[in-house]
Amino acid sequence: MRDRSAAIMKHMASDTCNKIIQSLTEGLDHPDDICKKLGVVRQTVDWHLVRLSALGIVERVPISSLSGRPKIVYHLSENGMEMMRTIDDAVQSHYLKIKMRYEKEIEELDHELAKGSISEAVYIGKIDKIEKEIKILQGAGTAP
């Protein structure tokens, strides 16, 4: 299980892969349209779509065309949509837990400062560190 999870996470760690998935959720389905939106070459989009398809995250769907040759489009598979919802839920839950931990740390620092058990300089240093960590957490795309 961990090997499969690692393989999926490794592929999805790509910024381009994430942008392709986002494009699919926004209704783009043809590789050419995705290429135009992302400003990348077709081979890059095809490479990611083939892998996402092999991982069961997207599905290839042939659509009839007037030229006789079917047009291939892509969309998130049911499993892919379920996986994205699960990831979103897990990330949101993680974000809230970590945010609560930071809030508790700040509250404890406030009490220590009020009691005089830490200096204002130490307090400011620790608050600055926590605020930087919060910005990193929010920058990870988990902030509501």
Image (spheres, rainbow, N blue to C red):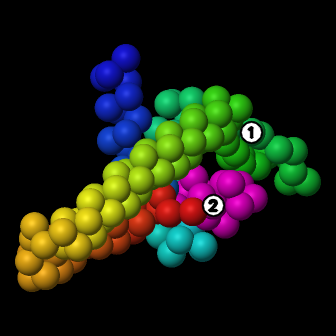
Q: Is residue 73 above or below residue 122?
A: above
Residue 112: x and y in percent read: 19, 65
Secondary element at image label 2: helix
| SS label for mark 1 | strand
Note whether residue 80 is visible: no
Magenta stretch, residue numbers: 19-34
Q: Position of residue 90 (x, y in %)?
A: 50, 40
Give the residue at x 56% y 67%: 35
Res 94 quadrant in image = top left
| Residue 95 x %, y % | 44, 52
Residue for badge 2? 23
Of all residues, the one furthest to the top in this rendering is: 1
**Is 138 one of the magenta-colored residues?**
no
Instruction: Return the mark for residue 80.
Output: none
Residue 61's disc number: 1
| Total marks in image | 2
The kind of residue tagged 2 is: Ser
- x and y percent of residue 93 in the render? 50, 44
